[in-house]
Image (tube, rainbow, N blue to C red):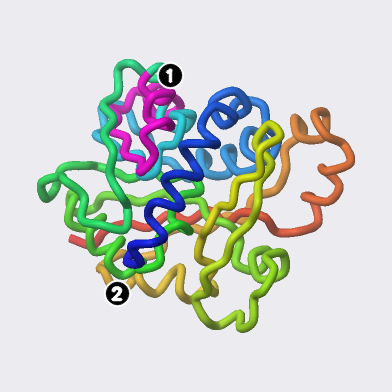
Amino acid sequence: MPDAQDRPNVQQAYDRLASGYDREGDTKPANAYLERPATLSLLPDVTRAQVLDAGCGAGHLARELSDRGAAVVGVDVSHEMLTYARDRVPDADFLQADLGSDLPFDADTFDGVASSLAFHYVREWERLFRTLRRVLEPGGWVVCSVQHPHADFEEYDGTRNYHEIERVSAVWDSFGAEVAVPAYRRPLSEMVTPALDAGFRLDRLVESTPTEAYRRADPERYEYEATRPNFLCLRFVRSA
């Protein structure tokens, strides 16, 4: 993130949220039964692939990648999140890094990049996708999930212009403690154009819908999620 004041806010927020993410990540319906199935549906065969988990959090997606046969490297800005990720996926490598900065990897290192609900904490997607293109081999892929642009515009307080990138913030309740989490909301065009300009092509797009497991876990919320957008999942492929 280019604004220095945003980095510690995000890092500190997720350091405080980490224990909850660790405990709830496998069963929280919005993650386990809505976003993650849609994200996983876009993955190619990752057997023996070198995959970067960009914004790995507590390691739930990294575990899925590892279970599918990938060699996983995870990065996250939160030290506390990485502590849980290392325990969850001991065969993976994890290091602290900011997706808004250049990543500490050589060119053509990875076959793919997977990212679950992390890119919306980065303002400059042009820089982000240039960095991802550099660390990917030709033909490599990026699978990412983000907050849906329509849902963001409708649900965040203080949004003014859908067509602009706006810094937003939400207060999350983490086991009785209120944590302010900053992010950036952007229109759909600003989610796709930076990747195209960096040398990717858009291969597939999925708007997540809740699974039957979601219905069983939370029938009332299921009815809401089944008719409204929440997450957007994208797959890009790097040009040669």
Labels 1, 2: front one: 1
Residue under the image location 66 percent in, 26 percent down? 27
Residue sticking out furthest to the right:
220
The dot on residue 166 is none
- Residue marked by disc 1: 88
Q: Nearer the viewer, residue 137 or 123?
A: 123
Residue 66 is one of the magenta-drawn residues: yes
Residue under the image location 43 percent in, 70 percent down? 192
Q: Is residue 232 left or right of residue 176?
A: left
Q: Amino acid at mark 2?
A: Asp
Q: Is residue 68 visible?
A: no
Picture quadrant of residue 32: top right
Q: Position of residue 53 (x, y in %)?
A: 35, 39
> Can you say whether 148 is above or below 46 in the image?
below
Q: Is residue 202 visible?
A: yes
Q: Position of residue 148 (x, y in %)?
A: 61, 61
The N terminus sits in image quarter: bottom left
Q: Amino acid at mark 1?
A: Arg
The dot on residue 197 is 2
